[in-house]
Amino acid sequence: MVTRGVEAAAAAAGGAALGAVATLPLGIPAAGAVVGGLNGAIGGWRRVYEWNRGRGVLAFTLDNTWALLTTAGGVAVHGLNAVTRDAGYSPALSVRANRHVYERGVRMRKGFAITWGNVMNGAGELSGESTRAVRRRRLVTDHEDVHVWQARTFGPLYPVMYLGWMVTAGAAGALHWALTRRHSLAGTMDAWGYYANPFEWWAYSRDGNWPPHVLGDRAGIVWRRPVVRPLAERRAQTGA
């Protein structure tokens, strides 16, 4: 059996090589090697990648090449979480899952999980069989994991597209509020800028949670139907 140290060293070397090659056309191979090496070392030590499945190899390859920008954000978050009191790393939802999950850590919005590359923060209490714990675990597997793969799929375009939508649609929401004076300004901007974001619509739909109940009657001003089938339905059909 490969030890954690050997896996970490091998993944660090592989990540560094991939990162250097990916950023060579940009003239910053050393920076790419550092990010890829750190991602590989952390991921290898924590055994997050599924090396025996194509999905895991693809995740590792994308994290250290096309999605290296968002991976760099994830590496930075690891560093911040390391100096944050009780970030609460969850091996149960991270090992061989192609992601890192923290129960707490650095967050932008109270009560909301946030994903930076392959790192999830703010997952909440995950242990036990309480209704809340079960729900938070599904949030990780059926919502935040979708964001992990969105980042891998869209690479450097992902943060630009995500933030670009938030700013543009948020401004459109403010204009809509000014014309209609329905709901509140903050609530309307939140509905347009965050919940209506196609990346969030996709993730909430996969989670079987569209429209989110917190939208209330604001749901009528954004997407009315899920964009994709919930993962729970797919698992029920396949028996996975």
Image: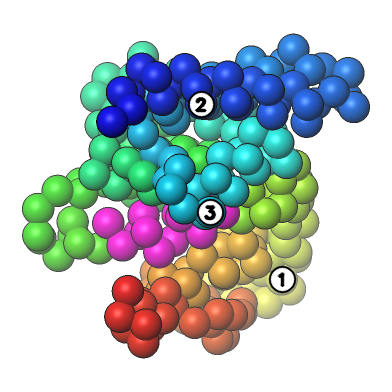
Kindly identify the residue that appears in the image at 51 percent across and 65 percent down: 203
Q: For residue 54, which numbered disc appears in the image?
A: 3
Kindly identify the residue that appears in the image at 78 percent across and 26 percent down: 21
Q: Is residue 101 left or right of residue 30?
A: left
Q: CA distance from mark 3 to mark 1?
A: 46 Å
Q: How many marks?
A: 3
Closer to the camera in the image, 112 or 79: 79
Closer to the camera in the image, 205 or 181: 205
Density class for disc 1 (Cα within 10 Å; few <14, some 14-19, many ≥20) is some
Q: Earlier in the sequence, mark 3 or mark 2?
A: 2
Q: In this picture, which residue range is highlighted in magenta? A: 137-149
- Label 3's element? helix
Q: Are marks 2 and 1 in contact (CB under 8 Å)?
A: no
Q: For residue 113, which numbered disc appears in the image?
A: none
Q: Nearer the viewer, mark 3 or mark 1?
A: 3
Where does label 2 land, which residue? 11
Kindly identify the residue that appears in the image at 9 percent across and 53 percent down: 128
- Label 1's element? helix
Amino acid type, label 3: Gly
Q: Is residue 93 left or right of residue 73?
A: left
Where does label 1 land, which residue? 176
Kindly identify the residue that appears in the image at 69 percent across and 29 percent down: 18
